[in-house]
Amino acid sequence: MSLTLRQLRYAQAAARYGNVTTAAKVLHVSQPSISMAITQIEEHFGKPVFVRQRGSGVSLTAFGHVVMAKARQLLADAETLETLADADSGLRGELVLGCFEDLAPYCVPSILARLRRRCPAIDVVVREEGFDTIGRHLDDGAIDLAISYDLGLPASSTATILCELAPQALLPAGHALAERASVTMAELAGEPLILTDQAQSWQHVLELFHLCNLRPAQAIRTGSFELQRAMVANGLGVALAYSRPYGDFSYDGRPLLRRPIADPLPLQRIVIAQKARNALAAIQMVFVEETRRWFDEVWPTIHAGAAHVAA
């Protein structure tokens, strides 16, 4: 039995919404039609693609992630083929984007808005990821593209550099080091260091101290970037950070200051990555193009504005 595009579309909807009933409502078909398509696909491959849960809930198996990644590319190519006769209809299809959770609020909404103006029929499913999952999901096909710092990405991926950033010291207002034009790693090592308890992140920061033959006197881990900022703003320690929100204030309204690091430290890269052996579909190529343009045109102005406010 050969698979049909309709079966793949039905299964893709079930994977996207995690629920057969919801997928049926969105596609305006019956629930049994979705269930039958899933069954036929699994019979074709001879192994499960979905894990069934109570209440019509479904989730992909490891093999299912691979199947759906290929299905997304096939459906995107098919929809692009349908538009060739009508140049004004534009590209259409779906891609799944994974973005490191601390970067997503900075760039993803603006990139999606630009993409919608250019190609309104492209549907982007966004997944906020940690360093511990984004590489794995890129490798197993659960996501098509990843925007992240160049940390923890698999060897099976290839990355395009979007920008490079130097770490900066994050200080509370009124801190003694705030009077300095720049600070040294040795000075920071003598202060309580606030780290985000994210895989790869806290290890990377400690490695920067190790490169300077230093070890922080005290390290405190937090669960998120915003909690880290709030703890620094309240005078509980200092931090190293790459991200620079426009308007440096913590959630409780306390000001934060940034100072460059005097020591020579390696730059960190923000990249957009794909699985190396997968050829990009047309809609993915357009997304990569818009992302690169955004980082060329918009990102520098965001950081310039953040630096001005933080000074």
Image (cartoon, rainbow, N blue to C red):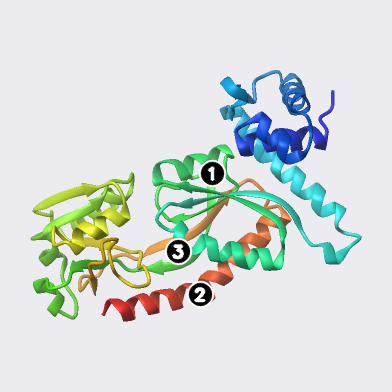
Q: In this view, does 222 lie to the left or right of 174?
A: right
Near mark 1 (Cα within 10 A), the count class, few <14, some 14-19 or many ≥20, is: many
The mark found on residue 138 in the picture is 1
Residue flagged by tag 1: what amino acid is it?
Answer: Leu
Question: SS of the residue at dot 2?
Answer: loop
Residue under numbered circle 3: 106
Q: Give the quadrant of residue 53.
A: top right
Name the mark nearer the viewer: 1 or 3.
Answer: 3
Question: SS of the residue at dot 1?
Answer: helix
Residue flagged by tag 3: what amino acid is it?
Answer: Tyr
Looking at the picture, how far across and down is residue 129, in whole percent? 45, 46
Give the mark count: 3
Residue flagged by tag 2: what amino acid is it?
Answer: Val
| Proximity of marks 2 and 3: CB atoms separated by less than 8 Å | no
Distance, label 1 to label 3, CA atoms, is 21 Å
Near mark 2 (Cα within 10 A), the count class, few <14, some 14-19 or many ≥20, is: some
The mark found on residue 298 in the picture is 2
| Proximity of marks 1 and 3: CB atoms separated by less than 8 Å | no
Looking at the picture, how far across and down is residue 269, in whole percent? 42, 62
The structure residue drawn at horizontal position 21% and vertical position 47%, both measured from the top left corner, is 221
Of callouts 2 and 3, which one flags the residue occurring earlier in the amino acid sequence?
A: 3
| Proximity of marks 2 and 1: CB atoms separated by less than 8 Å | no
Looking at the picture, how far across and down is residue 204, in whole percent? 29, 52
Distance, label 2 to label 1, CA atoms, is 26 Å
